[in-house]
Image (cartoon, helix red, strand yellow):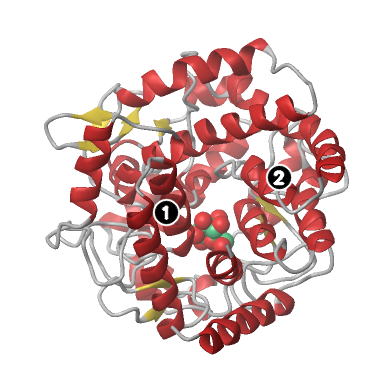
Amino acid sequence: MTPHDTQTLINKAKEVLALNDMGGWTRPDPGLYVHQWLWDSFFAAIGQRHYDIERAKTEVRSPFRAQWKNGMLPHIIFGDAKGYHAGPELWHCERSKDAPDNIQTSGVTQPPVAAEAVVRVGQKLSAEERRAWYREMYPKLLAYHQWFYRERNPRGDGLPVIVLSWETGMDNTPPWMHSMHRYAMSLRAQLIQQANFTSIMERFRKDTAAVPAEERISTIDLYAVYDLIKSLRKYKYDNETIMREHKLLIVDVTFSCILIRANVLLKEIADEIGEALPMDIEHAMHVAPHALETLWDTETQQYCNRNVSTGRLIKIPTVSTFMPLYAGVLPKERVKTLIRQMHDPKTFGTPFPIPSTPINSDYFRPNRYWQGPTWVNMNWMLADGLERNGEKKEAEQLRERTVDMIARGGMQEYFSPFDAEPAGAANFSWTAALLIDMLTD
Ligand code: 2M8
């Protein structure tokens, strides 16, 4: 790509972020996701830091205005916009004693990329400014991380228990959909499915007004997710009850890896401002990498989610299998195995890698949301992970393919791994922000 192309792309990306700038926070896109999402905001800040550091700081601070009293950061903060398909009337967060006052949110969280954003913004500051920034953010981040170990880690193994596929951010990722169908379909969802009512229910969907139905989660999966949200609501979002009663409890590879990495970054922050991490976090940092290794399945040679209720691994392959590269430094042999799989033309080695589901999977559709398309945020984290695992060339190659994909498809939510055909929402913030980051650093 010529330098001119690069500048044009950066300018376009900045326009997208300006279009989605709601003042103190950035919405994911103008049509479908009209509120604030947790990891979307942190990714947005990672791009903004390159041209407006104060704006990036504001973005990173903004999710904390809705931090729950128990430390949780909610995955959606609702604004005034109308029309989102899973708005505050679905969640009723005021039923929880921990919900924040005077602000409407969802009742679950999302992958904890907060510490990543804090550190990336910190990299752009002078040493003195950075320490002030870290002093401001550290207590809030710490409260968030401690919430996982107090409320979501009954086994004490350092890997959090996830209660809704929406927490993973990979909403209809196959292992979750598989387990939901098998163990956690509400009576209503079963009836809709058995009576073949999905085409009728389709008419009531709001999300498919903005994005074609075949690019979104299927209708039956969406209604089943809504019902799981209603059951969390019934438990008043109380995690003790949820850990006991909820039908879908999963240790998720991607989520776990992001938390493992986030703790390392939290420690970096603590060290720089002369704070000692509390014992619960130290303990989690010590045990989590071992627990992560128990998610490796020697038979299929992949990292898998674990169904907490059955104790069994869910051996359905997805892009998550590569995320331990992001979590930390793996043995060389394992890194080589994962890289070989990334390049295998029968599975993940597509012209625009890395597909969210391998192309030989029964679930695979090139344009269906988290069941096939390539996502920029996953590639961004995996490139970072490859680099920290000593695979600089692989990392550069992945970033180049990702930039090329966006140059062809536009600032879209996701892309076909075959030909970069754009799908999902247009003018998508994290695609724009992470593109700026990849082209600038
Ligand atoms: C998607 O999820 C929301 C629900 O949280 C939806 O489909 O309505 C996911 O891709 C998620 O990862 C993302 O944060 C969100 C907003 O971009 O959209």
The percent position of residue 219, horizontal first and vertical second, equals 39, 64
Residue 199 is labelled as none
Callout 1: SS: helix
Q: Identify residue type, mark 1.
A: Ala
Nearer the observer, 172 or 245: 172
Task: State whether residue 77 appears in this view.
Answer: yes
For the N terminus, the image quarter is bottom left
The answer to whether any part of residue 143 appears in the image is no
Front residue of this view, candidates 75 and 263: 263
**Residue placed under numbered mark 1 in the picture:** 383
Q: Quick check: is the Cβ at mark 2 less than 8 Å away from ligand 1?
A: no
In the image, is residue 179 above or below residue 242?
below
Q: Which residue is at 73% across, 36% downward? A: 95
Picture quarter with the C terminus: bottom right
Q: Which mark is residue 118?
A: 2
Residue 303 sits in quarter: top left
Which residue lies at the image location 48% right of the left edge and 42% below the top edge? Answer: 164
Residue 368 at x, y = what percent? 34, 68
- Which quadrant holds residue 184? top left
Q: Assess disc 2: are there few (<14), some (14-19) or many (≥20) residues with their C-alpha within 10 Å of its C-alpha.
A: many
Residue 417, x across and y down, in percent: 29, 70
Establish whether ligand 1 lies closer than 8 Å to the Cβ of label 1. no
Cα distance, mark 2 to mark 1? 19 Å
